[in-house]
Image (cartoon, rainbow, N blue to C red):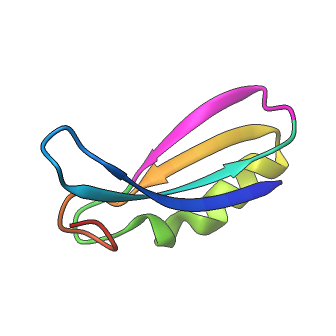
Amino acid sequence: MQRDEGVWQSADGLELFERSWRPAEPKATVAIVHGFAEHSGRYDHAGEHLAAAGYAAYALDLRGHGRSQ
C-alpha cells in the first residue's frame, strides 16, 4: 500500500490538504468525506482498511478543517 499526503489549490486559490491510501492494483476508488468539525486524519484506519481490501481511498480536509485553509 502506498500512503501519500499533499496540498492542492482549489479554483478560488485556497490550499486544501489531501491524503490517499492506494494498493498496487486497485479494484475501484473510494472518496472519504469527513463530518462536521472533523478532518481526514480521523479516517486513517478506514483508508488503510480499504487499501488492504484492494480499494484506492482518497480524503481531503474540507475548507476550514484540519490542515486546509
Residue at (64%, 59%) from the top-left corner?
4
Q: Position of residue 15 (x, y in %)?
A: 27, 58
Q: Give the mark count.
A: 0
Q: Visible in this render: residue 25? A: yes
Q: Position of residue 16 (x, y in %)?
A: 31, 57
Residue at (61%, 44%) from the top-left corner?
57
Residue 29 lies in the magenta stretch: yes
Q: Is residue 19 above or below residue 67?
A: above
Q: Position of residue 35 (x, y in %)?
A: 30, 59
Residue at (34%, 60%) from the top-left corner?
61
- Residue at the farthest left position: 12
Closer-to-camera residue (57/69) = 69
Residue 23 lies in the magenta stretch: no
Segment tinted magenta in the rendering: 25-33
In the shown orientation, is residue 20 left or right of residue 9?
right
Which of the 4 image quadrants contains residue 34? bottom left
Residue at (78%, 26%) from the top-left corner?
27
Q: Is residue 44 above or below residue 18?
A: below
Location of the C terminus by quadrant is bottom left
Location of the N terminus by quadrant is bottom right
Closer-to-camera residue (29/4) = 4
- Residue at the farthest right position: 24
In the shown orientation, is residue 30 left or right of residue 62?
right
Q: Is residue 14 above or below residue 29?
A: below
Which of the 4 image quadrants contains residue 17? bottom left
Q: Visible in this render: residue 62? A: no
**Majority secondary structure of the magenta segment?**
strand
Q: Position of residue 24 (x, y in %)?
A: 87, 40
